[in-house]
């Protein structure tokens, strides 16, 4: 068996002189599931593209490296989603409004210079994950727990979709600040028993490894929600989702948002619809491998 046949049998991309480069910048990136997801997408459509993890120590040098090396598309993760903005030539209006970029598109202008455009697909990812679970956002009241970058993107997306959003957070001051920015209500965690809503979304790290028994809301309150989404995916079944299923809620796991924000990146980079089934199974395999 020759080398290229062996690569194809192993579902590895066949890298040659025409392979287009994609990847993720962040620090750290060694646990990222995005390489598995995007390489599976490229392979399933027979695209000659490869997506590599790139741990970044110096963002300015990394950005000129991307220009010089001819990268076509790049994901941006913690801690660079805000810091990357000064290095861009263009920012889409939503990324500018949110103040965070998770996707770069690189192209050549007529003079042969590289133009880098920054976009944000996180806010679309959470909407698509909830819509795929059959939730009509424009008719829903959604409680979002958290006040960090993830809560901002999720809350922004939900507001755009016409949902009624309520922010709750361990620290009231930061929760109120986000609610004010979004133009929505804030409710303290202790006041959740007096609230009625359709959907509950956790964007905090409560329940994330190694805090397996952590849960942001009292399980006794879960039966009142039709659906519960957790953006934590390690473990995949968080205590919140286990209790939500037991309470009869539809449960949307943390790989759903990762998948849908990635599907939107894929569409921006290739102009084609993302092969979501192949991406989801690659994510599940990679998540399982990471957890062992
Ligand atoms: P990200 O940008 O990923 O959203 P972040 O900016 O660090 O992350 O925000 C983390 C959010 O999770 C915050 O809302 C934080 O609450 P505080 O504002 O009170 O710090 C919340 N959070 C983290 N760990 C938590 C825990 N164990 N219980 C409750 N909330 C938690």
Image (cartoon, rainbow, N blue to C red):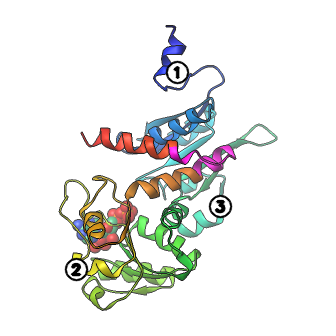
Residue 41 place in picture, x, y as percent: 55, 39
Picture coordinates of residue 280, whole percent (x, y) = 46, 47
Which label's residue is closer to the chain start, 3 or 2? 3
The residue lying at 50 percent from left, 11 percent from top is 3
Q: Position of residue 91 (x, y in %)?
A: 64, 59
User: Residue 108, image x and y in percent?
Assistant: 73, 40
67 in magenta? no
Which residue occupies 47% across, 73% down? 155
Vertical placement of residue 189 versus 123, above or below: below
Q: Which residue is mark 2?
A: 220
User: Closer to the camera: disc 3 or disc 2?
Assistant: 2
Q: Residues within 10 Å of mark 3 (few under 14, many from 20)?
A: few
Q: Secondary structure at mark 2?
A: helix
In this picture, which residue range is highlighted in magenta? 265-277
**Residue placed at 54% from the left, 57% from the top?**
101
266 vs 176, left or right, is: right
Provide the residue designation for mark 1. Answer: 8
Residue linked to disc 3:
92
Real-space Cα separation, disc 3 to disc 1, in angstroms: 37 Å
Where does ligand 1 appear, by image quarter?
bottom left
Q: Compute the Cα span from label 3 to label 2.
A: 42 Å
**Distance (Cα) linking label 2 and label 1:** 50 Å
């Amino acid at each position: 068996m020759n080398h290229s046949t062996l690569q194809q049998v192993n579902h590895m991309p066949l890298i040659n002189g025409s392979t287009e480069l994609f990847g993720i910048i962040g620090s750290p990136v060694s646990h990222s599931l995005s390489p598995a997801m995007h390489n599976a997408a490229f392979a399933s459509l027979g695209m000659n593209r490869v997506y590599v993890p790139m741990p970044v120590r110096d963002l300015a040098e990394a950005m000129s490296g991307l220009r010089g090396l001819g990268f076509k598309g790049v994901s941006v993760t913690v801690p660079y989603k805000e810091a990357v903005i000064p290095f861009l030539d263009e920012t889409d209006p939503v990324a500018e409004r949110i103040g965070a970029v998770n996707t770069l598109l690189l192209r050549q202008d007529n003079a042969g210079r590289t133009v880098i455009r920054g976009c944000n697909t996180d806010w679309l990812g959470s909407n698509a994950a909830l819509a795929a679970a059959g939730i009509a956002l424009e008719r829903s009241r959604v409680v979002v727990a958290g006040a960090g970058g993830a809560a901002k993107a999720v809350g922004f997306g939900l507001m755009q979709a016409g949902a009624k959003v309520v922010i709750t957070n361990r620290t009231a001051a930061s929760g109120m600040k986000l609610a004010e920015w979004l133009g929505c209500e804030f409710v303290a965690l202790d006041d959740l028993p007096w609230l009625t809503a359709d959907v509950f979304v956790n964007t905090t790290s409560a329940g994330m490894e190694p805090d397996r028994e952590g849960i942001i809301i009292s399980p006794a309150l879960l039966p009142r929600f039709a659906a519960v989404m957790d953006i934590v995916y390690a473990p995949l079944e968080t205590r919140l989702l286990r209790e939500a299923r037991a309470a009869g809620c539809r449960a949307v796991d943390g790989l759903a948002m990762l998948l849908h924000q990635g599907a939107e990146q894929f569409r921006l980079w290739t102009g084609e619809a993302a092969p979501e089934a192949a991406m989801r199974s690659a994510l599940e395999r990679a998540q399982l491998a990471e957890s062992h």
